[in-house]
Amino acid sequence: MWTPPDKIRHAIPPARWPSAEEAAASRWFSPINVGPCRLHARTWVPAMVPWRASDDGRVTRDVVVWYERFAAGEPGALVVEATGIRDVPSGPLLRIGDDRFVPGLAELVAAVRAASGGRTRLFIQLIDFLAVKRRPPPDKFFARFLRVDAGHRRRLAAALDDDRWLAAPESELRARLMSAETGLLEQVLTDRERRELDYGYRELVTDLDLPHVRDLPRVLPELFAAAAARAEAAGFDGVELHYAHAYTMASFLSRTNTRADGYGETIAGRARLPLEVLAAVRARVGAGLAVGCRMLGDEVIAGGSDLADAAQFARAFAAAGMDFVSVSKGGKFDDAQQPKVGEAVYPYTGPSGYECMPTIHSDARGPFARNVPLAAAIRAAIRDDGRTTPVVAAGGIHSFDQAEAILAAGHADIVAAARQSLADPDWFLKIRLGRGAEVRRCKFTNYCEALDTQHKQVTCQLWDRVELDEPDLARSHDGRRRLVAPRWRR
């Protein structure tokens, strides 16, 4: 993963832990309504993809145990990982694109209810994504994937000052490009072709020459609505529409969306499909299901959307009845690191990915609560319109005082923590019981994210080699790591 060039290794700040009485009187452990759902506390575990589903997207025992473990810490809300709304192969990622997935998801809901004593509200994150292919070997790219046209011939002839390439056999032209140096390729290939050679093929929402991409505004509202109805049938308390990071809906919101069909270019055009998806979901589910979204406060890419755009989108979402807005940052394909040949590009490896999950190796600003100002500005914009839609802040949250200060300043209504919750799924409960000194504190090295980047089962370095002799312990595929944190022995 990319890190700032002038990076500093920041120490984990010491933490002061409250007594049980102070925790009980705090803002963080006070209730809040999120649409029709009442959370017993403003503690929130965001969606994390642990790569534990079956290859056909079903809930496995490992998935159930993963969420049971977080539920044991009794957070106010727990968001299940990004779950695909299409019934298409997507590896060990949960899916909700068909009714056959509902029984497994219902089992997951029941397990969380039991593990938390009914205290934790369970949401599920609904995601759509476009095709991303592995980076091809150059010989395969030039022999099979490059679509040769007259433009290639003209540019090659001009670059080499040799008109014979205007009519040369295609096989010879492909062979010449296969042996070409970088400078020649830059003259002959389009920007898109060079990126596909260097990074692999990736569909964009602006590929209107592809019928299935052109039809996304017609297709996606129904897909999201059907997925939300299945979530409701499985017993979830709410759904989180994934409008963030590198995926389809965030790509519609991006300034890079130049679609000229009414679903791009302008602020209103870029927000149109996300608002239509929200309306379709609302029309399909009952009033008892919370409907919110995860969105970006800043894309952090050249030519991308910034905080001013995000504030306008959030205002529109709140006006349309969104029950909560969870704010993230970056995580885009546009600036991701080049993958190795045979691997797919991963959107959390470049500068925008770093801003999504900053580490202790940071610039002078440090990694802790770095993204809170985005949530604060978005919340202020919503409040300026007279609306009280809850805003969720996240990113480098690791202590009670930090979370309490965010809430006291009015920067957010709910404070979420992913990596710290992974490091210690019991940390909310420990704090509430006045036993914060026992919290296992995240080191923010992104050991977990490195596993995610490789689509390996996600664990934490603070506990995945601990008590490996535990009876009936579920282990990673290589047998070297435990899959859930050890139980807290009170």
Image: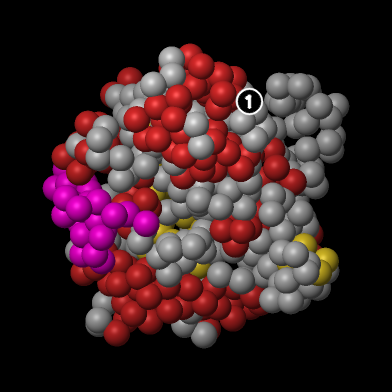
Instruction: Return the residue at label 1.
Output: 179
Residue at horizontal 65 percent and vertical 35 percent from the top: 181
Q: Nearer the viewer, residue 297 or 416?
A: 297
Residue 175 makes an appearance in the image: yes
Residue 270 lies in the magenta stretch: yes
Q: Is residue 226 above or below residue 310?
A: above
Which structural element holds mark 1?
loop
Residue at horizontal 80 percent and vertical 47 percent from the top: 462
Residue at horizontal 32 percent and vertical 68 percent from the top: 314
Q: Nearer the viewer, residue 479 or 74?
A: 479
Q: Position of residue 433 (x, y in %)?
A: 67, 64
Q: Residue 199's quadrant in the figure?
A: top right
- Residue stretch in magenta: 256-284
Q: Amino acid at mark 1?
A: Ser
Q: Position of residue 336 (x, y in %)?
A: 58, 48
Q: Residue 272's quadrant in the figure?
A: bottom left
Badge 1: residue crowd in 10 Å (few <14, some 14–19, many ≥20): few
Q: Nearer the viewer, residue 320 or 408?
A: 320
Q: Nearer the viewer, residue 153 or 219?
A: 153
Q: Position of residue 214 (x, y in %)?
A: 22, 38
Q: Magenta-highlighted stretch: main secondary structure?
A: helix
- 73 lies left or right of 207: right
Q: Is residue 233 above or below residue 327?
A: above
Residue 73 makes an appearance in the image: no
- 315 lies left or right of 19: left
Q: Residue 404's quadrant in the figure?
A: bottom right
